[in-house]
Amino acid sequence: MAKPKGPHGSTGDGGNVGDGGHAGDGGEVGDGGVPRQRGGGQHSRPTTVAETHRAVTEAAESGRPGGPRSTDGKPTEGDADAQRPQNDPELDKHDPKSLEEIAKARKQIADQLQEMVDDSWDHVDQNRDSILQQEGYQRQREKLIEKGYPEDVADLIVERTAMGTEAHRGLANAIDSESTSMLDPETGFRLRTEVGYDAQGVETPKVKDQDFRPDVILERQYKDAATDELDWEVAHAYDLKTGLKTGIEPSWANKVQRVLGLPEPPEELRPTQRPLSVE
């Protein structure tokens, strides 16, 4: 199976009328809001495994308590570097050591990722009136009414479609602007958003060719046995859900895990506070 390669550009989430979802994922059908309680520079990467391990060792030694850069015996930034995930591209992604580092990478980004989800949803909720007045959503409303939908039903469909679409867009923009600070590529991990794949798991930029598209993917470096060069492969996938009634469909999750060879099924992302303006 071909592996996902190279940088990507967002394919966009056009938000089909009444689905609030995105290409090939089974989407969310007209159900906005989330009932949960809310709690309070580009880097070059090592080119060899030896360089990677040396960099981690040097960071750990220079920042250990009482070490050369510690003046008070307390952990310094170097300790945080030593604890960060560090992928070994020589290993298969299902190797126990790789699984450990994937889990570490997921843990490192979990809080910030959730904060981005919450901020995106809050922004959409606070600006829903102006969002709904956008020309594209007004055209959707008109088409629904032309098809015979009552105005109140058309309004509800468009509102929930718009909120889901804009929440996805906001999350993607936030991650794209902060991805390298969330997870330094020198760790051998990186984040990408809105990457689509065909039925064989080959990355494709054309929406019409996409069979599925996770909202966020965590990638790890691996050494391609055929070329003996470093490349990137998906290690974990996330999907944003903003509806009350739906989560990730098991059939979709199973397909994504199987086709991309993921250690675990895609992980659901949800805002942790239900907007008061959603009934």
Image: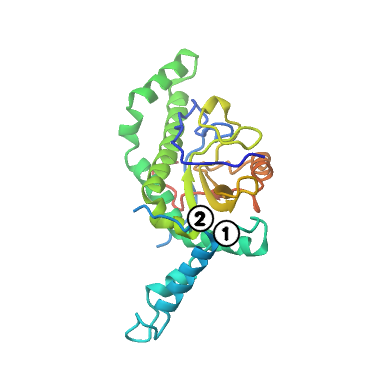
User: Looking at the picture, does residue 95 appear above or below residue 66?
Assistant: above
Determine if residue 192 is in view: yes
User: Looking at the picture, does residue 176 appear above or below residue 15?
Assistant: below
Which numbered disc covers residue 102?
Answer: 1
User: Looking at the picture, does residue 113 appear above or below residue 137?
Assistant: below
Q: Position of residue 13 (x, y in %)?
A: 46, 32
- The residues tagged by marks 2 and 1 sit, at their Cα atoms, a distance apart of 8 Å
Which part of the image, by quadrant, shows the C terminus? Answer: top left
Q: Closest to the observer: 92 or 119? A: 92
The label nearer to you, 2 versus 1, is 2
Q: Position of residue 188 (x, y in %)?
A: 51, 57
Horizontal side, residue 144 vs residue 199: left or right: left
Q: Residue at x 48, y 73 (%)?
A: 57
Which numbered disc covers residue 189?
Answer: 2
Q: Residue at x 50, y 55 (%)?
A: 189
User: Which one is earlier in the sequence, the residue at label 2 or at label 1?
Assistant: 1
User: Looking at the picture, does residue 124 appear above or below residue 269?
Assistant: above
Dot 2 falls on a residue whose secondary structure is strand
